[in-house]
Amino acid sequence: MPWFPAWGIEFSEPIENPSPTVSLFNEWRPSDRWLLLSYHAACSEVRLWTAWSALRRREESGRMIARTPDAEFLRLISGTRQLSVAFQRAGLSEGDESAWIVCLPDYAMGDEFGDIEIHRSAYSDNDIEATRLIEHLDAKLLAKRPIPTDEGLIRLDAIDIEELVEASDRENVFLTHSALADM
């Protein structure tokens, strides 16, 4: 599985108010196919590609709930139909010290289920733009890829604070939670 085009970043200080950071990001991003995602919401390469695939199917069939791909992706990651809840769960929040800069490729879907070519260079093809955004945010790149955590499941409201999920089951819980977005 190729790396999803997502760059983990650490802010110079915890976010006090997400609005100025999101506004700055939106001012400099190349298109609405770029977004800021809560650090713990990403989970894994499989989950990011799965949510992306669901996004592309909805885009091509005209079935998106949100008006833009970035908002629809957050909605799918959050496992909800409500956009305001999606931004609370998977968007940038007060106190966040890190996040993911995400680029949503617009590869065409094939005619049959699973018929899509994911370019192995999806990450590297967008690295220059991501680096520019990191610099504008006065952040630093983290040398990490997404991993499933209980913290992420709690943030997405997939489990309660007192619940714990076995490490081997976390990714499946994230995937199931995303699948509930349209229920």
Image (cartoon, helix red, strand yellow):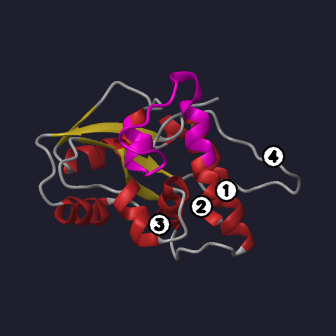
Local crowd size for mark 2, using a 10 Å CA cut-off: few (<14), some (14–19), many (≥20):
some
Whether residue 52 is situated above or below residue 43 in the rendered picture = below
CB within 8 Å, label 2 to label 3: no
Which residue is labeled 2 in the image? Answer: 181
Q: Is residue 86 left or right of residue 177?
A: left
Which type of secondary structure does the marked residue at label 3 adopt? Answer: helix
Q: Amino acid at mark 1?
A: Ala
Which residue is labeled 4 in the image? Answer: 114
Which residue is labeled 3 in the image? Answer: 71
Q: Residue at point 15% right, 60% down?
A: 17
Which residue is labeled 1 in the image? Answer: 54
Is residue 54 part of the magenta span, yes or no? Answer: no
Q: Residue at point 72% right, 61% down?
A: 57
- Quadrant in the picture for residue 4: top right
| Magenta span of residues | 151-176
Local crowd size for mark 4, using a 10 Å CA cut-off: few (<14), some (14–19), many (≥20):
few
CB within 8 Å, label 1 to label 4: no
Which of marks 1 and 3 precedes in the sequence?
A: 1
CB within 8 Å, label 2 to label 1: yes
Which of marks 3 and 2 precedes in the sequence?
A: 3
| Residue 100 pos. (x, y %) | 37, 43
Query: Distance between the Cα atoms at labels 3 and 4?
Result: 23 Å
